[in-house]
Amino acid sequence: MKRALLPLAAFLALLALLAAGLRHDPRQLPSALIGRPAPAFDLPRLAATGEHVSSDSLRGQVWVLNVWASWCEPCRDEQPVLVDLAARRIAPVYGLNYKDDPQPARQWLAEAGDPYTASLVDRNGQTGIDYGVYGVPETFVVDRAGIVRYRQAGPLTTASLEDVIVPLLRKLQREGEGGGGGGNG
């Protein structure tokens, strides 16, 4: 009798694992960076000014990093949301132009609207790899101490902006005003 129950128990265990897996949103990819320092970078600006922006220069402020490319269709979908976020001036939005040709990238921003304080050239994709980017677009929120507090894989939507990004940015900004540092997000 006990031998007959063993396959049933194994089946029920597999069924429970499957049910647990189905409850997770497949777009919610885990990120080892949450709660850890943002990877260091020193990258040229897409604006072809010869200037660079480094992660060290962003310390002391809350900022958003949006990974995008001119060849990315979902990036086009999220562009109005990024323009809206930038217009709110809650935190600077930096673009990471991922594995793209600079000229089409500059042209696309000129046509679609440029929400970025600066867009940085990641031509070989190394900085994207350092951030654990699975694909474009992806967005990261980084606190004043340089700690990654949030990551969204896929395009930003009005709902994700209103429900997650804006409240988090405001919380991180308030924590900085009180001298409390980066917070726990």
Image (tube, grey):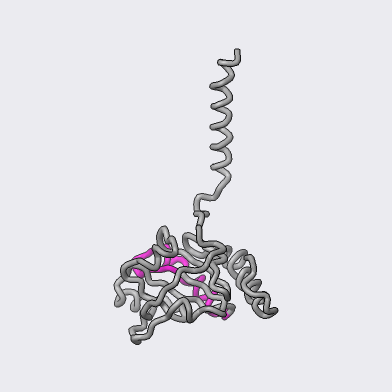
Q: Picture quarter containing residue 15?
A: top right
Judged left or right of residue 146, residue 178 is right
Please say if 9 is above or below 49: above
Q: Picture quarter containing residue 69?
A: bottom left
Residue 120 locus on image (x, y percent)? 39, 76
| Range of magenta residues | 67-89
Task: Tell me the residue at 67%/79% (across/down).
Answer: 179
Residue 63 locus on image (x, y percent)? 53, 75
Task: Tell me the residue at 46%/76% (across/down).
Answer: 55
The front one of 78 and 171 is 171
Please say if 24 is above or below 72: above
Residue 106 locus on image (x, y percent)? 34, 78
**Magenta span includes 77:** yes
Task: Tell me the residue at 40%/77% (across/down).
Answer: 42
Task: Tell me the residue at 49%/69% (across/down).
Answer: 38
Q: Which quadrant would the C terminus be assigned to in this image?
A: bottom right
**Magenta span includes 61:** no
How many marks do you count on the picture? 0
The front one of 93 and 143 is 143
Residue 94 locus on image (x, y percent)? 46, 76
